[in-house]
Image (tube, rainbow, N blue to C red):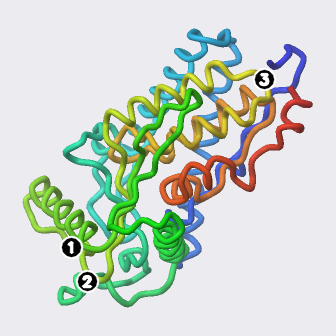
Amino acid sequence: MRRTADPLPEITAGNLPTPELAERSTDPAVLRRVRGFAESQAAAARVELRRLLDLAPLPGPERVRAFESAHARLVKWRYETALRTPSRLGRGLPHDPERFRVRLADDSPNCDRLGYLGRLRDGSTWNGEARLFTGGADTPAHRVMLRYGQRALARFEQTGTPGDELRNLVVLPDGQVVVGNSLVRGDRARRVGRELAERVARRQGVAPQMELGGEPLYAVTAPAESRSVLFAEAMRELGHARPGDVAAWQRARYLLYQAPLTKKGSDAVTRTFLVAVGAFLLGTTPTLEQDADLRCMVDGQEGATAMPGDPLVEAALSGS
């Protein structure tokens, strides 16, 4: 672990690159504002890193509790930043800060459409006949979702999944297998879309303009029992990791992305937490891929545990 005389690992916005999914405009001024959120994330991560260094929790249950507390504070931080945000960028459901602290449940999983999402195009308009947003200008958000739609369909082929649902199975270090998130297509995806629209209509009291047309494809969050197991295992991995153990941090990252806690904001919380805890454990600050969440939802455990920008094990150990 870090020695007293060692310099504090530096955390900057560069360690938290803006997800392309957040870039839903062609206006440079709007994009600059969106990218500015990385500064807030970096500041929150620095606060948590300093707390961890001051507390210096011992490996084991003490450190697990410290990490759980850090994660809980970041959930509260994300909710409070949502309260200060006047609206969301682009098309879609109205901004609702309460969704940043509402816990996921089995009767209301998160269902994220992959592939074509016209609402992510700048200036698109609702086409009631097609049940899609059409027109407008291309954006990074639109492109990244098209790309991951293709990757999701490719996984159906690669795994030889014959039906409309591909369940991502997560293998824990002790060999236990837990059901993670699902990818759904075809009739199953159309049913998921209808159920999602019905839930939103009940909540808002009006039928939403939700994209149900085309060839829907969704990533659906894991069952609540699985997410509880996966979150606890992520904290155990990190809490018992030896200094410089990049592999443990990588395994925990995948588990955390499989175990979101709230309806909104889990990606930002997970990114900020992983950077703070990574700097604490590794002695060097990791930089997350902008699409880390999508990789973990779509690519499966084998394809998404290690990512291109991760610290090298040798580099982390030599700096610890």
Task: Give how far across and how far down residue 109 sits, in percent.
Answer: 28, 48
15 left or right, relative to 120: right
* Residue 209: mark in rendering: 1
- Mark 3 or mark 2, earlier in chain: 2
> Disc 3 vs disc 1: which is toward the camera?
3
Q: Front-most of 232 and 170?
A: 170
Q: Considering only order in the chain, which callout, 1 or 3, is on the residue closer to the N terminus? A: 1
| Res 47 → quadrant | top right
* Label pair 2/1, CB-CB below 8 angstroms: yes
Residue 5, image x, y percentages: 90, 16
Location of residue 183 (image quadrant)? bottom left
Q: Amino acid at mark 1?
A: Gln
Instruction: Please report contact status of discs 3 and 2: CB closer than 8 Å, yes or no.
Output: no
Secondary structure of residue under mark 3: loop
- Name the residue: 13% across, 57% down: 204
Task: Say which mark, if any, is on residue 264.
Answer: none
The answer to whether residue 250 of the structure is visible from this angle is yes
Q: Please tell me whether mark 3 or mark 2 is closer to you in this view.
A: 3
Task: State the SS at label 1.
Answer: loop
**Disc 2 marks which residue?**
126
Q: What crowding class fits label 2: few (fewer than 14 Cα within 10 Å), some (14-19), or many (20 or more)?
A: some
N-terminal label among 2 and 1? 2
- Label 3 sits on residue: 243
**Badge 1 local density, few (<14 within 10 Å), some, or many (20+)?**
some
Q: Is residue 237 above or below residue 296?
A: above
Q: Which residue type carries mark 3?
A: Pro
